[in-house]
Image (cartoon, grey):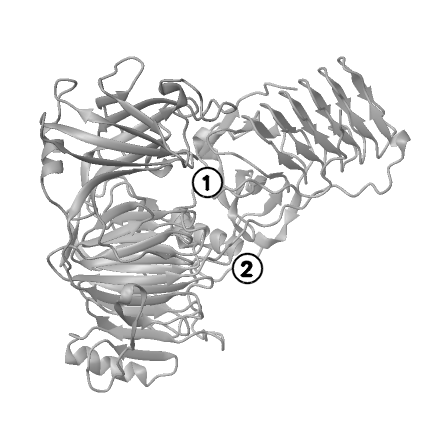
């Protein structure tokens, strides 16, 4: 058996898998997207920080009459608005007193540390539910504003409800202060003598070509003030015209905001695209991202379908790459004999639109109900497999709407309410899936997205091809194409497409490094290494430091003192440092282990379903490893804490004083959502999830502090690295009235 010496420094935390690595397509009022009420408005999250890896946020802001926030500034992000419906008054300048009512089609760039506010005075041209109002898009770079809204705003339950007017109270200002102190983001209300820093970028206003003369006149007056640059996309006298350029796919773009004007954080453009003719056909492109519960599969498939006139049926040809269909072939020889998880167990056509599961309508391969009676399976030279046949109405009834979809017409990207689904041993609920849709061979050559490429269709029908998948975006639809994807766009409709196009470079914001409490042992002599047998061993040397102890096989009990390295290895082991003097490594290895920290210890569960428990000490780092792990962060008492002075600051009105903060400095390094659990047991006044507060960790937007208020003092029970404060919920916690373990 080979024994390691253990990790002396931090172990990289796992990265959550919610970052969008292909594309987003979201309509303006998509009911599946999160939305909040804030400042009398309704804000819909079209792209959030997790999805964009903190590169940006993109929102739809709906402002009822009278809606809009008071003047404020953002110390962390730029914010850019593009008015999509109605007229909105923007209040700019150092005190937010330089006001201008701007029409639909205007762009406003509000740099960080520049004051802005906005208000809908009387526009009612747009509707949200039953409420009339105006709308603007909001782009913030980098991402963080969605976390601010999650902290301070009220979640929308039913978008059809009237938009309420929610006045800020003391609790609101506490949330504003806590978020700002912890992140350096959020909003700040300008003091009467506020001056932006010397390196603050200038405001940028771009008027549309149909702006009224009185708007142009006021804009010209603003352009003469320090800190303002005002342009037009038209030819209004007195204002410079925005430049145009030929960009991707040979399209002429109008620049609304350049990289130079935004500090190299984004470029904001618009374009028009004339219609072109095409002949569309029906295809399904299968991948893991279309499965309702996404898988990590790299397999793909392409299915071509067309009417089969001889029997009024449907002929299909499905080519699959990356899955094993060998056992379904005549010789029954597996393609990947060493991997049973990729064995195909079922291929079906289902009824259901994108994002929803539905019943089978035709079973191509199914061990219980085989509809297809004349199936052909062919292994190709490149390792892919082609499955073909004819769906005859004598085998299973063919839905009329599917037949009509195949024989009818439609724009590339138009989808049917049917999809292909392939099941495997590893993913019995579905490995890859593909919606049956119309596509075309007339797209321009694809290019690779090296940045986040954003589109917002204002008018017309834009067909977008990402990889092999084709989507159709109508008016008021947002598309984000993540870096590293091949894509192209085309207008196969009958009217001109008008669209915004924004390029945002990746930010690559990482969670704060996790400091290891361990210190290097230096030279380790043979006498410092202890190898136990394969039985159920007990090891305790309370006066020995800097030992490396290997449990071997069996269910061992190993006790640490100071600077020890305990390796449970195989078996269900107990590794206990609760009476030690710190800086111990407890590594469970294989098996379902129980690891108990003292202070300044590093716990590594390893493989298996492990219990990692903090009894009394602080400054511990807990890595669960694989398996469904339990992280016990408080059990019968609050672990040792230190006073954190960062919350004891004097805040200007209207912010109240914040409670004192005590911090355990304990860290959960690799919590896995939906798998691991956080336990809190037998703590007075913590009886359920509502007794906790979740906030971003100090200086780390990508991590979460778990807090509880006891006797007027806030206690930070633990930080959860790499998990956002809006991602944890009651289902991730187990709160017990009394301890289940000693």
| Residue 401, horizontal then vertical, whole percent | 11, 32
Q: Which of marks 1 and 2 is nearer the N terminus?
A: 1
Which residue, given by chain and number where applicable, does mark 1 sit on?
A: 17
Q: Taking the image as drawn, is residue 292 in sight?
A: no
| Residue 237, horizontal then vertical, whole percent | 20, 86
Q: Which residue is drawn at 37% across and 33% down?
A: 380
| Residue 208, horizontal then vertical, whole percent | 21, 73
Q: Which of 26 and 333 is in front in this view?
A: 333
Label 1 – label 2 distance at C-alpha: 39 Å
Q: Is residue 315 left or right of residue 479?
A: left
Q: In this view, does 551 lie above or below 316?
A: above
| Residue 168, horizontal then vertical, whole percent | 35, 53
Name the mark nearer the viewer: 1 or 2: 1
Tell me the quarter of the picture where residue 4 sits: top right
**Quarter of the N terminus within the rendering:** top right
Which label was assigned to residue 650?
2
Q: Which residue is drawn at 44% across and 56% down?
A: 55
Q: Residue at x 11, y 32 (%)?
A: 403
Crowd around label 2: few <14 · some 14–19 · many ≥20 (10 Å): few
Crowd around label 1: few <14 · some 14–19 · many ≥20 (10 Å): few
């Amino acid at each position: 058996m080979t024994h390691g010496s253990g990790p002396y420094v931090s172990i990289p935390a796992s990265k959550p898998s919610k970052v969008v690595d292909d594309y987003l397509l979201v309509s303006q009022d998509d009911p599946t997207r999160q939305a909040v009420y804030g400042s009398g408005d309704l804000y819909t999250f079209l792209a959030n920080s997790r999805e964009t890896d903190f590169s940006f946020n993109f929102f739809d802001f709906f402002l009822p009459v009278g809606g809009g926030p008071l003047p404020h500034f953002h110390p962390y992000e730029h914010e850019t608005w593009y008015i999509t419906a109605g007229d909105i008054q923007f209040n700019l300048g150092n005190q937010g007193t330089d006001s201008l009512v701007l029409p639909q089609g205007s762009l406003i760039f509000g740099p960080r540390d520049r004051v802005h506010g906005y208000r809908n005075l009387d526009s009612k041209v747009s509707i949200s539910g039953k409420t009339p109002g105006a709308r603007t898009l909001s782009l913030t770079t980098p991402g963080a504003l969605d976390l601010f809204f999650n902290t301070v705003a009220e979640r929308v339950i039913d978008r059809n409800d009237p938009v309420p007017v929610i006045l800020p109270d003391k609790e609101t200002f506490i949330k504003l202060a806590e978020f700002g102190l912890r992140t350096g983001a959020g909003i700040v209300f300008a003091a009467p003598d506020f001056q932006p820093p010397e390196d603050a970028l200038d405001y940028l206003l771009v008027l549309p070509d149909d702006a009224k003369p009185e708007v142009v006149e006021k804009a010209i007056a603003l352009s003469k003030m320090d800190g303002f640059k005002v342009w037009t996309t038209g030819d209004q006298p007195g204002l410079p015209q925005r430049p145009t350029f030929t960009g991707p796919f040979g399209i002429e773009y109008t620049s609304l905001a350049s990289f130079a004007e935004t500090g190299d954080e984004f470029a904001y453009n618009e374009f028009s695209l004339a219609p072109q003719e095409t002949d569309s056909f029906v295809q399904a492109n299968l991948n893991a991202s279309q499965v309702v519960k996404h898988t990590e599969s790299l397999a793909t498939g392409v299915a071509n379908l067309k009417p089969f006139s001889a029997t009024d049926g449907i002929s299909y040809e499905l080519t699959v790459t990356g899955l094993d269909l060998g056992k379904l072939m005549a010789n029954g020889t597996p393609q990947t004999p060493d991997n049973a998880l990729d064995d195909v167990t079922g291929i079906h056509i289902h009824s259901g639109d994108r994002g929803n599961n539905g019943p089978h309508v035709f079973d191509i391969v199914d061990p219980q109900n085989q509809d297809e009676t004349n199936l052909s399976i062919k292994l190709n030279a490149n390792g892919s497999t082609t499955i073909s046949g004819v769906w005859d109405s004598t085998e299973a009834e063919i839905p009329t709407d599917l037949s009509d979809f195949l024989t009818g017409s439609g724009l590339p990207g138009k989808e049917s309410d049917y999809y292909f689904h392939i099941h495997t041993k590893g993913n019995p609920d579905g490995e890859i899936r593909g919606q049956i849709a119309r596509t075309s061979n007339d797209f321009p050559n694809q290019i690779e997205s090296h940045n986040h490429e954003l589109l917002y269709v204002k008018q017309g029908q834009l067909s977008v091809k990402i990889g092999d998948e084709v989507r159709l975006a109508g008016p008021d639809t947002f598309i984000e194409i993540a870096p590293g994807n091949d894509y192209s766009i085309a207008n196969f409709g009958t009217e001109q497409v008008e669209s915004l196009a924004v390029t945002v470079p990746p930010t690559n914001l990482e969670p704060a490094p996790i400091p290891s409490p361990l210190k290097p042992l230096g030279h380790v002599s043979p006498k410092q290494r202890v190898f136990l047998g394969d039985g159920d061993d007990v090891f305790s040397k309370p006066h020995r430091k800097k030992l490396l102890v290997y449990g071997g096989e069996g269910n061992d009990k190993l006790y640490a003192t100071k600077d020890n390295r305990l390796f449970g290895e195989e078996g269900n082991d107990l590794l206990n440092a609760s009476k030690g003097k710190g800086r111990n490594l407890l590594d469970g290895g294989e098996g379902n282990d129980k690891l108990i920290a003292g202070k300044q210890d590093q716990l590594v569960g390893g493989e298996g379903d492990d219990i990692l428990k903090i009894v009394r000490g602080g400054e511990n780092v807990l890595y669960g490893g694989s398996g469904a792990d339990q992280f016990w962060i408080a059990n019968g008492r609050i672990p040792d804490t230190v006073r954190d002075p960062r919350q004891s600051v004097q805040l200007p009105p209207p912010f109240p004083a914040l409670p004192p903060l005590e911090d355990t400095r304990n860290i959960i390094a690799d919590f896995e959502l939906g798998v691991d659990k956080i336990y809190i047991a037998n703590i007075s006044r913590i009886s359920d999830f509502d007794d906790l507060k979740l906030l971003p960790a100090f200086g780390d937007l990508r991590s979460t502090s778990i807090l509880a208020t006891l006797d007027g003092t806030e206690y930070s029970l633990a930080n959860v690295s790499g998990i956002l404060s809006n991602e944890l919920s009651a289902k991730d916690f187990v709160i017990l009235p009394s301890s289940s373990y000693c």
